[in-house]
Image (tube, rainbow, N blue to C red):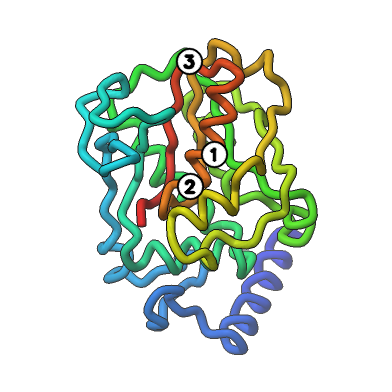
């Protein structure tokens, strides 16, 4: 019976590959297995960073307590927004290639592991989606990664924020001032008691202008967060 299942599965995979030949999601090159998502050349282009950054000027920080500009959080970008990262994130969010989340989760985990931060007292949370957008997409890409991070480091994962404003996409806003206004007051606390006095890892996919992270961290600080590290796949 088990052998029959394996044969049937192999036949279906072969038929599927004939109809939809597996290709690299970044460059379109043929690959052996679509579950790999990237060809070897594109995969080799991924560079994992480990340094914390100032969200204001991008300067490298010695540790999570150092600061060159006053900010509610420090930024921990796992990579830069160079190919193949944009293609991975786009296909993860909009093409329902959910398993790409494993690659992106691994990236932020390695980044955090190599950062040298003492993590034992941190709580992991994520940038939330507006409910209608969440229902349409079926998942929150930031929550997928947040759960992976929490599981790997044996940290609690909490839904600390809710999105109360269905604002237009940040990518459609022209500059930082427009982006900042676009997300103004779009987050509220879900449970202030779980925020007060806590050190928080705030997970998102990309930091472009930083407006979304700025607003989310402002709310977390308002309710007493002690420290916030914004962990993202890439800094654009």
User: Considering depth in this image, is 111 or 44 the residue closer to the camera?
Assistant: 111
Q: Distance between the residues labelled 3 and 2?
A: 20 Å
**CA–CA distance in space, label 3 to label 1:** 16 Å
Query: How many C-alpha atoms fall within 10 Å of the one at disc 1: few (<14), some, or many (≥20)?
Result: some
Task: Write the residue at 43% across / 44% down.
Answer: 232
**Residue named by callout 3:** 226
Say which residue appears at 21% left-offset and 39% top-offset: 59
Against 205, is 37 above or below? below
Q: Nearer the viewer, residue 21 or 75?
A: 75
- Label 2 vs label 1: CA separation? 6 Å
Residue 105 screen position, x and y as percent: 47, 45
Do the residues under discs 3 and 2 have CB atoms within 8 angstroms? no
Tell me the quadrant of the picture where the C terminus can be found. bottom left
Quadrant for residue 38, please give it: bottom left
Image position of 160 with respect to 104: above or below? above
Q: Mark 1 points at which residue?
A: 215
Q: Name the residue under label 2.
A: 211
Asked whether the residues under the numbered discs 3 and 1 touch, taking CB atoms below 8 Å apart as contact, a structural biologist would say: no
Q: Does residue 61 appear left or right of residue 25 in this picture?
A: left
């Amino acid at each position: 019976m088990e052998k029959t299942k394996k044969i049937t599965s192999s036949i279906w995979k072969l038929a599927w590959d004939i109809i939809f030949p597996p290709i690299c999601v970044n460059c379109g090159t043929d690959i052996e297995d679509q579950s790999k998502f990237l060809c070897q050349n594109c995969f080799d282009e991924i560079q994992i960073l480990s340094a914390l950054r100032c969200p204001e000027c991008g300067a490298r920080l010695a540790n999570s307590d150092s600061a060159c500009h006053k900010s509610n959080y420090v930024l921990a970008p796992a990579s830069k927004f160079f190919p193949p990262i944009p293609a991975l994130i786009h296909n993860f969010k909009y093409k329902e290639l959910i398993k790409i989340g494993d690659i992106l989760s691994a990236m932020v985990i390695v980044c955090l592991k190599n950062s040298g931060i003492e993590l034992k007292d941190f709580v992991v949370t994520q940038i939330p989606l507006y409910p209608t957008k969440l229902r349409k997409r079926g998942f929150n890409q930031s929550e997928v990664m947040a759960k992976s991070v929490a599981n790997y480091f044996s940290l609690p994962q909490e839904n600390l924020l809710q999105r109360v404003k269905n604002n237009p996409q940040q990518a459609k806003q022209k500059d930082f001032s427009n982006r900042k206004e676009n997300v103004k007051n779009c987050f509220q606390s879900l449970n202030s008691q779980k925020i007060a006095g806590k050190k928080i890892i705030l997970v998102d996919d990309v930091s472009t202008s930083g407006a979304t992270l700025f607003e989310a961290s402002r709310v977390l600080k308002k309710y007493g967060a002690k420290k916030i590290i914004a962990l993202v796949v890439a800094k654009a």
